[in-house]
Amino acid sequence: MAARTAALPSVDVSAEISATPRVVVDAFFDPASLAKWWGTIRSVTTPRSLGAYAVEWPTSSTRDEVLGRLGGVFRGTVMHFESTRGFFIADAFWLPPDGGPIGPMALEMSCSLGLNTEGRPVARIRVTQTGFEESARWRRYYEVVQSEWPQSLSNLKSLVEGPR
């Protein structure tokens, strides 16, 4: 009997946003947009191959039992970028306010144009985050980011779609 391999922790979230793919992709690279939907306080993002991708969040006042204070910096290298289809960031690390970095990992956002149930155009986006090394810190990291990504994409949707 073959042994079953458990799936490694990762993130895989999707959303439909009533906007063009270009507008959605731009929101991942524009400092003002990142501050609004992702809560960053600083960012250096270069939308091109081998560009820098670094975002910083404020340090939380509360402490996670495993990770310490949340916030810090997420940084990586843009390996692939298409303004209407998405991007791929490799060699990414989270540099928390407390403790050593977690990484390397990859972050990918793909975007395509589709139609919603009412036949209106929407950007269908999918965000995946992968990379894992067996440890309590890595497992807790994914528990935290898996719960944060859906809210972040909801914030992105609200920002891009504007008031209704």
Image: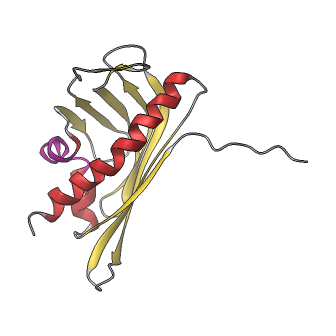
Q: Nearer the viewer, residue 2 or 73?
A: 2
| Magenta stretch bounds | 28-37
Place of residue 79 in the rendered image (x, y in percent of width and height, measured from the top left): 43, 44
Total numbered labels: 0
How was the colour assigned to the protein in this rendering? secondary structure
Q: Is residue 37 left or right of residue 100?
A: left
Q: Quadrant of residue 4?
A: top right
Place of residue 108 in the rendered image (x, y in percent of width and height, measured from the top left): 43, 49
Residue 26 visible from this viewpoint: no
Residue 32 visible from this viewpoint: yes
Q: Residue at x 34, y 31 (%)?
A: 74
Q: Nearer the viewer, residue 114 or 43?
A: 114
Location of residue 102 with respect to 54 vertically, above or below: above
Place of residue 30 in the rendered image (x, y in percent of width and height, measured from the top left): 18, 47
Q: Nearer the viewer, residue 61 or 125?
A: 61
* Farthest bottom residue in view: 119
Q: Which image quadrant: the C terminus?
A: bottom left
Q: Is residue 67 left or right of residue 152?
A: right
* Farthest right residue in view: 1
Instruction: State yes or no: residue 143 in magenta.
Output: no
Q: Residue at x 57, y 23 (%)?
A: 135
Place of residue 64 in the rendered image (x, y in percent of width and height, measured from the top left): 36, 22
Q: Residue at x 31, y 37 (%)?
A: 53
Q: Residue at x 26, y 21 (%)?
A: 62
Q: Quadrant of residue 19?
A: bottom left
* Farthest top residue in view: 99
- Magenta residues: mostly which secondary structure? helix
Q: Is residue 158 left or right of residue 152?
A: left
